[in-house]
């Protein structure tokens, strides 16, 4: 049974794309068949997986507006066990194109459901906004993982995101669950990181992953080489953390 997980947070710079790329790659490394869907117009997941986002004929944008089928924008086995539906800046026009379309909240779901059984996991990288693209990701997904940066304003905006997830669950996708929160950019040298983790644990009644992703130079370097961290530097602290997170995600599904 495949699982579709949206990686969402309307705040930018919280490690959302980093988590989408590296969680997907570590799941693939563990023998799972994984499809990554880049739903962010910045296309950072696409380029972070070594694909030239500006040289693509078909992306998720063309699929959404009906100019191509999912199969025509699907890039199979970008890495072993890891396929990609890419994105680029064209996707920023999708909001306007979708305005008057009937059932616009379900366009991506309709397409993804035709191939979901080919994969163990489908990971969707959402844009850093609560937009129609994010709603499409949430109607497609079974659950949502929320990356939270270990910084002072971590909780700000989180209640808004949880409210959106609850709303989508109530009105559009009754099967949607809050998969959990994962802490990113943890700096063991600062008291602040520790305080943020404690604060969120005390105030947030959600599943929180045990694995905490550290601040890590190698993790920051990997995208510029178009490689996930487990292939760029498999011994780094960042790679070890994402491998542990992948284990947790797999085990949660097995339960």
Image (cartoon, rainbow, N blue to C red):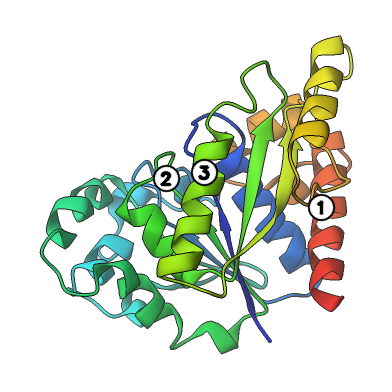
The residue singled out by tag 3 in the image is: 161
Question: Does residue 85 appear in this view?
Answer: no
Q: Disc 2 versus disc 1: distance between alpha carbons? A: 22 Å
**Toward which corner of the image does residue 130 lie, by quadrant?**
top left
Question: Does residue 233 appear in this view?
Answer: yes
Lateral position of residue 232 relative to residue 15, left or right: right
The residue singled out by tag 1 in the image is: 245
Few, some or many residues within 10 Å of mark 3 (<14, 14–19, 20+): some
The answer to which of 16 and 77 lies nearer the viewer is: 16
Vertical order, 194 against 163 (above or below): above
Return the disc, 2 or 1, that comes first in the chain's sequence.
2
Few, some or many residues within 10 Å of mark 1 (<14, 14–19, 20+): many
Q: Secondary structure at mark 3?
A: helix
Q: Position of residue 62 (x, y in %)?
A: 23, 66
Vertical order, 119 against 157 (above or below): below
Q: Disc 3 versus disc 2: distance between alpha carbons? A: 13 Å
Vertical order, 225 against 4 (above or below): above
Q: Residue at x 24, y 68 (%)?
A: 104
- Quadrant location, the C terminus: bottom right
Few, some or many residues within 10 Å of mark 2 (<14, 14–19, 20+): many
Q: Position of residue 151 (x, y in %)?
A: 69, 19
Q: Nearer the viewer, mark 3 or mark 1?
A: 3
């Amino acid at each position: 049974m495949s699982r579709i997980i949206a990686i969402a947070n309307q705040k930018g710079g919280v490690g959302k794309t980093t988590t989408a790329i590296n969680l997907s790659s570590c799941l693939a490394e563990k023998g799972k068949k994984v499809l990554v869907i880049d739903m962010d117009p910045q296309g950072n997941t696409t380029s972070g997986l070594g694909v030239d986002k500006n040289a693509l004929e078909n992306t998720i944008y063309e699929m959404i507006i009906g100019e191509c089928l999912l199969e025509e924008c699907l890039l199979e086995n970008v890495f072993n066990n890891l396929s990609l539906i890419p994105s680029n800046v064209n996707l920023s026009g999708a909001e306007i194109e979708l305005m008057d379309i009937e059932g616009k909240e379900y366009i991506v779901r309709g397409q993804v459901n035709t191939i979901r059984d080919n994969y163990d996991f489908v990971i969707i990288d959402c844009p850093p906004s609560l937009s129609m693209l994010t709603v499409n990701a949430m109607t497609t997904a079974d659950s949502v993982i929320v990356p939270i940066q270990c910084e002072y304003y971590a909780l700000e905006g989180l209640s808004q995101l949880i409210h959106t997830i609850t709303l989508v669950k109530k009105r559009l996708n009754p099967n949607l669950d809050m998969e959990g929160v994962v802490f990113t950019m943890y700096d063991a040298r600062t008291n602040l990181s520790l305080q943020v983790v404690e604060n969120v644990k005390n105030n947030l009644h959600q599943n929180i992953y045990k694995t905490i992703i550290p601040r890590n130079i190698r993790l920051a370097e990997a995208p510029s080489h178009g490689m996930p961290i487990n292939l760029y530097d498999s011994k780094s602290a960042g790679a070890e953390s994402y491998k542990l997170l992948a284990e947790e995600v797999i085990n949660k599904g097995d339960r």
